[in-house]
Image (cartoon, grey):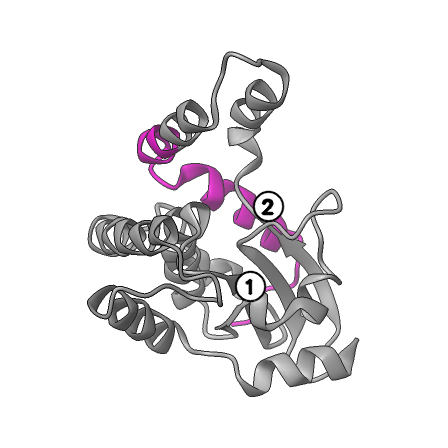
Amino acid sequence: MNDIILNALKYALSYEDYRALHQEQVRDKLTSGTNQIDSLVEFTKLNNSRTRRWEKRYTPETNFANLNPSEKEIWLIISETWCGDAAQNIPVIQKIADQMPHVKTRYVFRDENLELMDKFLTNGGRSIPKLVRIIEESLEVLGTWGPRPAASGFLLEKYKNDEAYTKEMYSEDLAKWYVDDHGKSIEDEFAKLLDHQTVAS
């Protein structure tokens, strides 16, 4: 496992580099990964706008500086720029991480790191975004988060169980749910994840 993580970290991007690459893809009408179909290119453009909106408007209500982990951590985030959940979640996670001196984020693309992705599946699937919490010194994996807040799960259940509820309807309702939630569900989940740990001064 450590070798897989080390290899991923060699090529991992900072948030600034991840966002710069995303914007380059929009400019050049591209997306991440090898599947350069028009729909994914359009999602990449839409997701850049969604991400910018979160970057401008979102500030955590929780003071995560008080939840700074006692050991330095890397939050390794597996993503793709065409992923709608990534656009809604990553800017929130990044602002949470920015408040904690002992946390740094790094970003890798799923389809370039399938060996890593396959160690952190969600119900057997390669769902993204997926955050892997790692102690920086030992590379011990503390846990994972993703691909979306648990509070949004009722929409996925409806999509799975209601044949009349189409993928397009699910996507629209999920996007609206993120806007109405204001990032609060992610905040609550990360606060619970961090609250039980020894806090560094």
Prevailing SS of the magenta stretch: helix
Identified at 40% across, 55% down, the residue is 82
Residue 149 or residue 22, whichever sits in front = 22
Toward the viewer: 160 or 151? 160
Q: Is residue 38 magenta?
A: no
Element carrying mark 2: helix
**Drawn side of residue 46 relative to residue 186, left or right:** left
Instruction: Residue under label 2, please give it.
Output: 192
Residue 143 relative to residue 43: left or right: right
For the N terminus, give its image quadrant: bottom right
State the mark number for residue 78: 1
Seen as rendered, the residue at the extreme front is: 37
Q: In screen coordinates, is 158 left or right of 23?
A: right
Closest to the camera, between mark 2 and mark 1, is: 1
Asked whether residue 182 is drawn in magenta, I would say: yes
**Which amino acid type is marked by label 2?**
Lys
For marks 2 and 1, give the CA distance.
22 Å
The crowding category of the residue bearing disc 1, from other C-alpha atoms within 10 Å (few below 14, some 14 to 19, many at least 20), is many
Q: Which residues are magenta?
A: 175-201
Check if mark 2's residue and mark 1's residue have beta carbons within 8 Å.
no
Q: Quadrant of residue 10?
A: bottom right
**Which amino acid, mark 1?**
Ile
Please say if 52 is above or below 113: above
Q: In the image, is residue 181 above or below residue 69?
A: above
Residue 105 lies, in percent from the top left, at: 48, 71
